Image: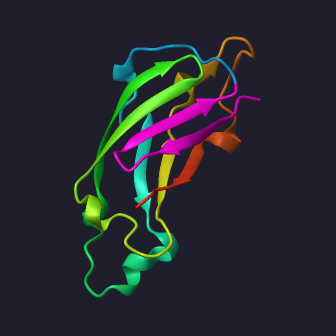
Amino acid sequence: MCKAAITKVSIYGEVEVEFDQEMMEYSLDNYNSDTLQIYVQPYRDWHEHKKSYDISQLNLTWTVKSFKSKKMEILLEFDHPEEVSPEIAPDSLIIDILDSNYFYSNALHKSLSEDYLRLEHEIPK
């Protein structure tokens, strides 16, 4: 079974995803919106309790900066960083892996396990 976890989300938008197996390396151009969906999940849907809150305030762009063996590094750029984790409890970063073919272990001859196609980690203030 191939496993993955978000191990770091910094206040500067640096994200690290670690894998328990060495993954095949592909061109970084393959890691785009067809492969990954990355977004902010508001803690307990706090945004629904604010009248007329525009959820697009939590939009972000991202780039995979490196993917070597067991570690992927992603850089996030929030459109409005001050809007992320405004409550006492932090919001979560969600990474949905849409195409597991780009997360393949030669040693196991398997792609990432279905249990690890959605990754989640708290976003610090």
Q: Residue at (61%, 20%) from the top-left corner?
A: 104
Q: Nearer the viewer, residue 41 or 9?
A: 9
In this view, 32 is above or below 40: above
Q: Position of residue 87 (x, y in %)?
A: 42, 75
Residue stretch rendered in magenta on the structure: 1-20
Q: Nearer the viewer, residue 102 or 60?
A: 60
In this view, 122 is above or below 13: below
Residue 34 visible here:
no
Q: Residue at (39%, 15%) from the top-left corner?
A: 27
Residue 18 counted in the magenta span: yes
Residue 71 visible here:
yes
Q: Position of residue 2 (x, y in %)?
A: 71, 29
Q: Position of residue 21 (x, y in %)?
A: 69, 22
Give the main secondary structure, helix, strand or loop, of the magenta stretch: strand
In this view, 69 is above or below 71: above
Task: Indicate the colouring scheme.
Answer: rainbow
Q: How many marks?
A: 0
Q: Quadrant of the N terminus?
A: top right
